[in-house]
Amino acid sequence: MFFWWSLVFAVGFALIHFFSKYMTFLSETPRSRFLSVAGGIAVSYVFLHLLPELHHYQNAVAKELHEGWFIYIENHIFMVAMLGLVVFYGLERFVKTSKEKNVLGEKQEASLGVFWIHIGSFFLYNLVIGYLLIREKHETLWGLVFYFLALGIHFVTNDRSLRAAHKDIYDKYGRLLLTTAILLGWGIGAITELNELVISLLVAFIAGGIVLNVLKEELPEERESSFGAFCIGLLIYTVLLMLIN
């Protein structure tokens, strides 16, 4: 049963990316309250589901990395998560610097090379999320539904951010690549199960990326975020998670 539902949700993720360009209400100023609600939901998902899940992956990593200098690093998985946050932060700074140097008329766009590096990182991001859609151990269908809800809304926010950074080239190439990444990740998960150590490291890396991507959308003053809407999203999703656990 979970197999077919995971396929439905993989297609749902893909459709979110594909049709994101038509969600014009997200471009409103001040910032749409929907995006602040989405941020609250994503933060709740990270702290109440994803980070606790890293404890499970920490055990898997500890079993594999019990020799050599790795033995002196007690929290390997959290260091990988921190690395993920640093890498995605570095990418954001890279994009911002490129935009400041490439002013075309009234538009600021990152260079083509920076675009491909940025989209490549999010391709991996989506690939892992698509894989986990079918391979993560969801105890109930509701668990799968809430995984889709949290990350589907998170994708909407990511799409808006990437479109703002890369303009038309994102709609022409980026959103199609991210759509493909989700389906490809699901397809890989459907036909094979990767080594648990590899998956552990990838999940931790992506967790750090999710934390950074949520915070960078909510914290800057120029975003004109709604703290109330952020708290509502966080509270609603937290209560729902508590009800199914």
Image (cartoon, helix red, strand yellow):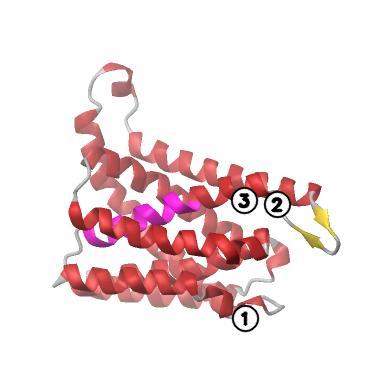
Residue range corresponding to the magenta coloring: 122-134
Pinpoint residue 23: horizontal percent, then vertical percent: 57, 80
- Left or right of 20? Residue 57 is left
Please identify the quadrant where the N terminus is shown. Answer: bottom left
Residue on which the image places disc 1: 24
Residue 132 highlighted magenta (yes or no)? yes
Query: Which residue in the rendered view is the most extreme toward the front?
Result: 172
Q: Secondary structure at mark 2?
A: loop
Asked if the residue under mark 3 is in contact with the one under mark 2, i.e. CB atoms within 8 Å, the reply is yes
Query: Which residue in the rendered view is the most extreme toward the right?
Result: 105
- How busy is the neighbourhood of tag 2: few (under 14 within 10 Å), some, or many (20 plus)? many
Does residue 170 appear in the picture of this structure? Answer: yes
Does residue 143 appear in the picture of this structure? Answer: no
Q: Quadrant of residue 174?
A: bottom right
Please identify the quadrant where the C terminus is shown. Answer: bottom left
Residue 55 vertical placement versus 61 (above, below): below
- Left or right of 139? Residue 49 is right
Pinpoint residue 122: horizontal percent, then vertical percent: 49, 53
